[in-house]
Image (cartoon, rainbow, N blue to C red):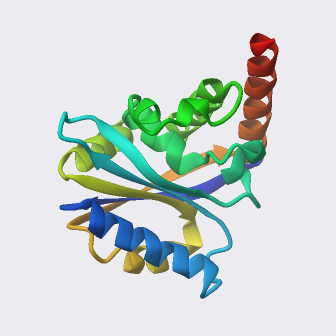
């Protein structure tokens, strides 16, 4: 079992525009500066009805982030673990055949890779704002990611351990099961 250590960064924002701006800065670290080899990110926004919706997401397919081309990664899985209805609001259940099962597998791995206390803290942290940015990156890129999330009114980092091979296997199984169920 090859367990990788990632860091989940959760920024809380007063506005979705600020979260989007920092999302773009993190993305620029990857695309323009070439400083992050792989990362997952998700922007969440609290709607008027109080529900949380994923408005943007990025998964790097060179790692488990792009689970079997489904465009779903650990950041999205963490958001879904914290706010289950975010998957519905973001239309993510229709991402792939068996999309709900893939999201469930990722959420399960995200939950299993963190302590209950850390998960509770992150959920409460995100509840404090109108928008949030969740970035999951390799641990040695922490300072660069934190600097890019400069508009956050609060920023918290928590360690997340994940067996990327097991995630890939679970996602593949979920997709295959979903494909069989659809026929």
Q: Decide if residue 96 is on the left or right side of residue 137.
A: right
Q: How many marks?
A: 0
Quadrant containing the N terminus is top right
Q: Residue 101: percent from the left, percent from the top?
A: 64, 24
Determine the image quadrant of residue 106: top right
In percent of the image, x 73 and y 33: which residue is there?
A: 171
Q: Residue 54: percent from the left, percent from the top?
A: 42, 46
Q: Decide if residue 83 is on the left or right side of residue 109.
A: left
| Residue 108 visible, this angle | no
Q: Residue 161: percent from the left, percent from the top?
A: 59, 48
154, above or below 49, in the image: below
32, above or below 168, in the image: below
Q: Decide if residue 6 is on the left or right side of residue 50.
A: right
In percent of the image, x 60 and y 86: which residue is there?
A: 32
In percent of the image, x 40 and y 34: which residue is there?
A: 89
48, above or below 85, in the image: below
148, above or below 112, in the image: below
In percent of the image, x 65 and y 84: which residue is there?
A: 34
Q: Residue 121: percent from the left, percent from the top?
A: 29, 44
Name the residue furthest bottom: 33
Residue nearest the observer in this picture, 89 or 36? 89
Residue nearest the observer in this picture, 118 or 23? 23
Residue nearest the observer in this picture, 86 or 39? 86
């Amino acid at each position: 079992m090859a367990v990788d250590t990632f860091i989940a960064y959760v920024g809380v924002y007063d506005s979705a525009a600020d979260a989007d701006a920092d999302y773009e800065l993190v993305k620029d670290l990857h695309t323009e500066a070439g400083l992050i080899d792989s990362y997952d990110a998700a922007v969440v926004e609290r709607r008027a009805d109080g529900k949380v919706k994923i408005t943007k997401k990025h998964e790097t397919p060179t790692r488990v982030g792009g689970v079997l081309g489904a465009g779903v990664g650990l950041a999205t899985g963490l958001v879904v673990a914290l706010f289950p209805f975010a998957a519905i609001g973001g239309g993510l259940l229709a991402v792939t055949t068996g999309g709900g099962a893939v999201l469930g597998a990722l959420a399960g791995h995200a939950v299993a890779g963190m302590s209950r206390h850390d998960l509770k803290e992150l959920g409460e942290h995100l509840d404090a704002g109108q928008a949030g940015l969740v970035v999951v990156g390799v641990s040695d890129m922490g300072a660069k990611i934190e600097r890019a999330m400069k508009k956050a009114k609060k920023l918290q980092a928590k360690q997340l351990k994940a067996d990327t091979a097991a995630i890939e296997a679970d996602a593949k199984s979920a997709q295959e099961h979903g494909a069989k169920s659809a026929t």
